Amino acid sequence: MPKMKTKSAAKKRFRITATGKVKAGAAYKRHCLGAKGKKMKRTSRGAMVLAKPDGIIVKRFLPYGRP
């Protein structure tokens, strides 16, 4: 059976942790930051772990994981 291909968009945006969870960058932090609250900007600084149903969908695009 041939190798499965990884979606290029997914490999740029997501990482899989050692425990199998999916990490992604937080949304709504690119522009118009003056209109957003301090708490929202502060919490969206780092990466976040996706919810389990969303992680299952993303893992279909990353068949071999990604370190």
Image (spheres, rainbow, N blue to C red):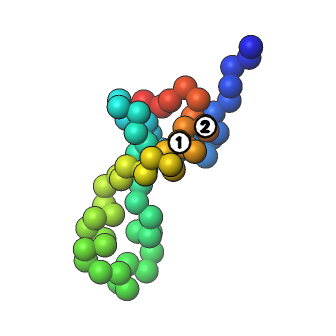
How many numbered marks, from 0 up? 2
Apparent side of residue 36 relative to residue 64 in the rendered image (left or right): left
Q: In which quadrant is the N terminus drawn?
A: top right
- The amino acid type, in three-letter code, at marker 2 is Arg
The answer to the question of whether label 1 and label 2 lie on touching residues, with beta carbons closer than 8 A, is yes
Picture residue at 41% right of the left edge, 33% below the top: 20
Q: In the rendering, at what x and y percent does residue 13 appear?
A: 51, 48
Q: Which mark is residue 36?
A: none
Q: CA distance from mark 1 to mark 2?
A: 7 Å
Q: Nearer the viewer, residue 23 or 21?
A: 21
Residue farthest to the front, as pictured: 53
Where 57 sits versus 2, above or below?
Answer: below
Q: In the rendering, at what x and y percent does residue 26 appear?
A: 40, 60
Q: Which residue is mark 1?
A: 56
Quadrant in which residue 18 is drawn: top left
Picture residue at 44% right of the left edge, 64% below the top: 27
Q: In the rendering, at what x and y percent does residue 36 appear?
A: 35, 81
Q: Secondary structure at mark 1?
A: helix
- The amino acid type, in three-letter code, at marker 1 is Ile
Q: Which residue is mark 2?
A: 60
Where 16 sits versus 45, above or below?
Answer: above
